[in-house]
Image: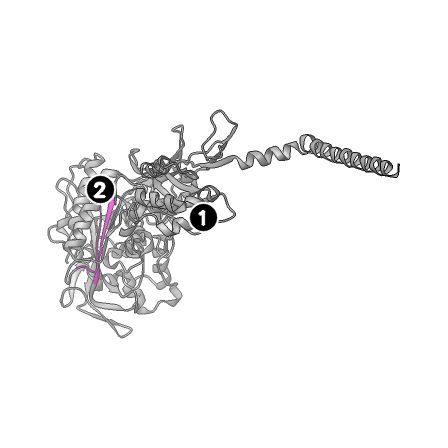
Amino acid sequence: MKRQRLTRSRLRISLVLVVTLFCLFGVRLFWIQGLDAQAYAAMARQAGTHTTTIPAPRGDILDRNGEVIATSVDGLTLTADPTMTADKAPKIARILVTSLGEDRIDYFETIEKLRTPKTQYVVLEKNLPAAKADKALKAVRKAGLTGVFGESVTLRSYPGGKLAANLVGYMSQTKESDKPVGVQGIERQYDDLLTGKDGSATYEVSPSGQRIPMADSTVVEMEPGQDVKTTIDRDLQWYADQRLADAVRSSSSDWGLAITMDVRTGQVVQLSQAPTFDPETPSTRNDGNTVSRFVQTVYEPGSVLKTVTMAALADQGKITPETQIKVPGSMTIDKYPIGDYWKHGTINLTAAGVIAKSSNLGTIVAAQQMNNQTMHDYFRKFGFGVGSGVELPGESKGILKPAAEWTKANHATISFGQGISVTALQVVRAVGAIANGGVMVDPSVVSGYVDQEGATTKSRETPTRRVVSKKAAAQVTRMMEAVTADDGTAPAAQIPGYRVAGKTGTAWRVDPVTGRYVRGQNTVSFIGFAPADEPRFVTYVVLDKPFSNAGGGSTAAPVFHDIMSMALERFGVTPTGSKSPKVEQEW
C-alpha cells in the first residue's frame, strides 16, 4: 500500500514537470512567432544577403569641342566571404594568381585574406579591368568553389595618352579613400563634381553565395558625375605637345612650357609641358614630370617683362616708341655690375630700339623715371605677386617683394625681369593685357559642366580689369613688332601674312638648392601675339636650362611660330592685310 502511494506521487511530479516544460516552450514559441518575429526575420535576411556598391560613373573631361580627353570604363573589385573560402583558400588563391598574374595579386597574402577570421567581407584586389576580373571569377566558379564576388567600379581611361596630362591630372589610390581620387590638375580641382554619388544594391543569396532569382532586393540609385568641358582644343594641344617635346630634346633643356590663350576671353586653348607622363601608367610618373609647372613652378622670366616696364611708362605718358634714350655701355648699381648681352659703348636708342634689341641698360635708364612704389604698383596691377585667377590646385603667387624692401639694384633688375619670380600663366595674363588693349582677362581652362541629360552649366564669369590705357598698350605693341622685324632679336617668329608682336627673354637661372644664380645656365623664352593689329592669341614658350648660348630668339621663337601658326589656322583667323609700321630703333 505504501509502495502504491509512492508510485502515484512520482507520477504526479512527472506530470507537473511535463506540463511546466510545455508551458515554457509555448511561451518561447509565442515570443518568437509574435513579439520577436521581425527581429529574427531581419537576422535571417542579414545572414543570407549581400550588399554591393553601384558606383557612380565619373564624369568625362572634354575639350572645347566635346572630344573626350578623360573618361571612365567598367572595372571590378574582387571581394570574398572568408566564412565560405577559409577551407579552400590555397586552391582559390592559386586560381586567382593564375588568372590575374603574380604582378597583380600575391598568392600568400590572398590566402591570409581568404582565411580572415570573424568577418564575412574582405577585399582581395581593387580596380581590375572588368574583362580580366570576370575571367578570374569564372575560373573560381568553374572549379566548384564559392565565396568570391565582384563589385562594379569605374576605372579612368585617357584616350589621348599623354595629351595635356599636366593640365588634366590623374587618378590614384590614397590611404584616406577606398577608391581612387583625382590628383593634380582638373581631376583634383573638380573631383567632387566629377565623382557623383554612389548607389547600392542589397539582395538575398543562397548558402553557396549565388543570388536568388526573384528574391527581395533593395536598390539605392546612384547619381552620375558631371562632365567638365575644358577650353582646350584637342588637335592644337596634340600638335603643341609634340612640337614642345621636340624643342626640349633638341635644346637639351631640363623642361619646357608652351601656352596659348585667347586674349579676348582668357580661355587657354593649349597648354603643354615637357617632359610629361601617361596618366594610365604609374611607372611614368615622378615628381619632376607630374608637377603643373605652368602654375606651380616659379622662375625669373628675364626680358619678356621689359614689356610691362614700358607699358607702365607709356601709361604715365613718360615714353613713346620714338622716345630717345641714351644707353651707357655699362652700369654699376649698389656695387652690382650690369651690362647688355652684347658689348657696346654709349649708344642712342629709341624706346622701340631698347625693346627690339632687348637692352637691359636702356630699360634701366627708362625705368628710373618711376620710383619704387609706382613701379611696384604697376607690376602688381599686371598680376605679379598674386594668383593668376585660374582654378587649378597648387598655384604659386610668385615673388614680388614690397616696394619698401627694394634696393636700387632691385629697382634696376626687376625692370628687365630679374629679381622677380613668376609663373608662366602670370606672364601670359600680363602680356595678354597689352594685346587686349590694356584690359587684363584672367586665364581659364574650364568653360562649363555637362550633366547626364546633356544640359550645360557655364563656369564662372572671367574677371576683367583695365591695367593701362588703350593708347599705352598700342604703343608697346608697336615696340614689340620691332622685335620680330628682320633686324630684331626674333625674326624667326615671323608668320607670313600676319603682323606679329613679341619679346624674347633670357634670364640667369637660379639654382633651386642654393638659391643662387648659376653662370652659364639660363631660362630662355619668347612671348608674342598675333595678328598684332587685331590680336586674337598670345603664345608663350619657355625652355629651362637649354644648351649653352641658347637664346629665346633662336630656340623658343621657332616653337612660337609653329604653334601660333597652327592656332590661327585652327580658329580661322585670317590676315588683316596691313603691314607693320616702320619704327626707328636709333636716333
Disc 2 to disc 1, C-alpha distance: 50 Å
- Tell me the crowding category of disc 1: few under 14, some 14 to 19, or many 20 or more residues within 10 angstroms, Cα based: many
Residue 18 can be seen in this image: yes
Residue at position x 44%, y 45% from top? 87
| Rendered view: 568 above or below 313 | above
Q: Position of residue 97 (x, y in %)?
A: 32, 46
Quadrant location of the N terminus? top right
Q: Magenta span has 525?
A: yes
Q: Position of residue 143 (x, y in %)?
A: 36, 37
Q: Is residue 550 magenta?
A: no
State the image coordinates of residue 460 (x, y, percent, origin top left): 41, 40
- 424 or 576: which is nearer to us? 424
The quarter in which the C terminus is drawn is bottom left
Where is residue 408 drawn, in percent x and y? Answer: 31, 69
Precedes in sequence: disc 2 or disc 1 = 1
Asked if 59 appears above or below 255 in the picture, the reply is: above
Location of residue 414 (image quadrant): bottom left
Front-lying residue, 289 or 101: 101
Q: Residue at x 25, y 40 (%)?
A: 160
Q: Which residue is mark 2?
A: 238
Question: Measured along the vertical axis of the image, is residue 311 above or below residue 14?
Answer: below
Which of the two discs, 2 and 1, sits closer to the camera?
1
Specify whether residue 489 is in view.
no
Residue occupying the far top of the picture: 214
Q: Which residues are magenta?
A: 522-546
Q: Residues within 10 Å of mark 2 (few under 14, many from 20)?
A: some
| SS state under label 1 | loop
Pointer 1 residue: 115
Q: Is 261 left, or right, of 458 in this rendering?
A: left
Residue found at the far right of this picture: 1
